[in-house]
């Protein structure tokens, strides 16, 4: 029973849902960017690097957040005693090494993104988390950059569709992080963290996230306007935008549900880009 609980604790440290989702976003960036056949070895290496780095960041975040989590998230592995703080730190180190080992096989631009992201993960936990807006922006960049990383991994550069994906995912994540800070307001105040809701108040912070979300959803129309993707993309990205906008509005009254639906909307938007690229490839083959 104890072994099972410890194994479950280590798994929970990685936030497996978030880690796998990040890997899927990296695949999406590669698929949307590349014009020919996917170089499978590079795609697999990029996905492994992304999943391992995301899992490592989550584990080290739990290490540094153990005191706050004792108030806000007592069911997490360290506060409930499933793993020790030292074990979580060592575990994150192993995951970071796995991410680096996968990333060194990729093109130089992708490797550079991986190095910047690994440094940003460490800097976030040590320097930026709990500062007004800065920590939110770092997490938003890290999420959006999974698309850039996937594109760079297959040597495709950064086409318009990938850049829009980066912006849309980044802003959706920024808004979601603000909403999560609203959820954690009591514990963050007690620990002396200066998050946006603590500094600006919950409604002003949420309003800032809502404005950013509106601008991002407007930008999602660019691939259609520029002729990169057609009607299939538009038919799917509009509902995804609607989910994200509704979730943002819902966050004012129900932050917990709002932030979950924001994540769903972001994944739906990524699916719209995949559908857009698939439709384009099918039209070229006929």
Image (cartoon, rainbow, N blue to C red):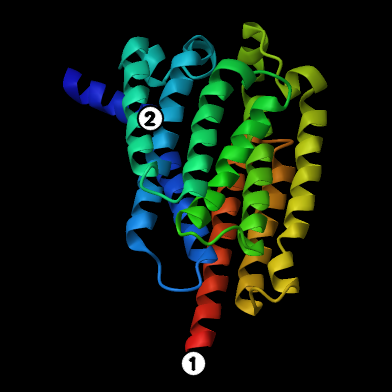
Residue at image location 73% in from the left, 65% down from the top: 222
Residue 238, given in percent of the width and then of the height, sits at 68, 65
Residue at image location 42% in from the left, 40% down from the top: 19
Query: Regarding mark 1 in the picture, which secondary structure is present there?
Result: loop
The residue lying toward the viewer, choosing from 234 and 143, is 143
Residue 9, given in percent of the width and then of the height, sits at 31, 24
| 97 with respect to 18 (left or right) | left
Residue at image location 49% in from the left, 92% down from the top: 286
- Decide if residue 15 is in sight here: no
Q: Vertically, is 14 above or below 264?
A: above
For the N terminus, give its image quadrant.
top left
* Mark nearer the N terminus (2 vs 1): 2
Closer to the eye: label 2 or 1: 2
- Mark 2 Cα-neighbour bin, 10 Å: few <14, some 14–19, many ≥20: many
Q: Give the Cα distance between marks 2 and 1.
A: 44 Å
- Mark 1 Cα-neighbour bin, 10 Å: few <14, some 14–19, many ≥20: few
Read off the residue under disc 1: 286
Residue 129, given in percent of the width and then of the height, sits at 61, 20
Read off the residue under disc 2: 96
Residue 239 position by quadrant: bottom right
| 53 with respect to 183 (left or right) | left
């Amino acid at each position: 029973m104890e072994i099972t609980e410890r194994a479950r604790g280590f798994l929970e440290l990685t936030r497996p849902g978030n880690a796998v989702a990040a890997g899927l976003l990296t695949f999406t960036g590669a698929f949307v960017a590349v014009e020919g056949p996917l170089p499978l070895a590079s795609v697999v290496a990029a996905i492994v690097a992304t999943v391992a780095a995301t899992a490592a960041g989550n584990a080290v975040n739990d290490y540094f957040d153990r005191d706050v989590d004792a108030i806000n998230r007592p069911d997490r592995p360290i506060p409930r005693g499933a793993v020790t703080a030292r074990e979580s730190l060592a575990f994150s180190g192993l995951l970071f090494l796995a991410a680096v080992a996968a990333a060194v096989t990729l093109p130089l631009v992708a490797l550079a993104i991986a190095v910047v992201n690994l440094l940003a993960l460490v800097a976030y936990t040590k320097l930026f988390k709990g500062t007004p807006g800065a920590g939110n922006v770092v997490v938003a960049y890290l999420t959006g950059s999974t698309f850039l990383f996937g594109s760079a991994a297959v040597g495709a550069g950064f086409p318009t569709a990938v850049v829009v994906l980066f912006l849309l995912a980044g802003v959706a994540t920024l808004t979601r992080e603000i909403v999560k800070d609203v959820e954690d307001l009591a514990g963050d105040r007690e620990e002396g963290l200066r998050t946006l809701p603590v500094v600006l108040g919950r409604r002003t912070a949420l309003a800032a996230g809502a404005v950013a979300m509106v601008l991002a959803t407007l930008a999602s129309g660019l691939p259609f306007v520029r002729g990169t993707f057609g009607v299939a993309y538009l038919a799917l990205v509009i509902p995804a935008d609607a989910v994200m906008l509704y979730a943002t509005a819902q966050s004012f009254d129900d932050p917990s549900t709002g932030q979950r639906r924001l994540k769903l909307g972001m994944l739906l938007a990524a699916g719209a880009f995949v559908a857009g690229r698939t439709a384009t490839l099918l039209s070229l083959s006929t």
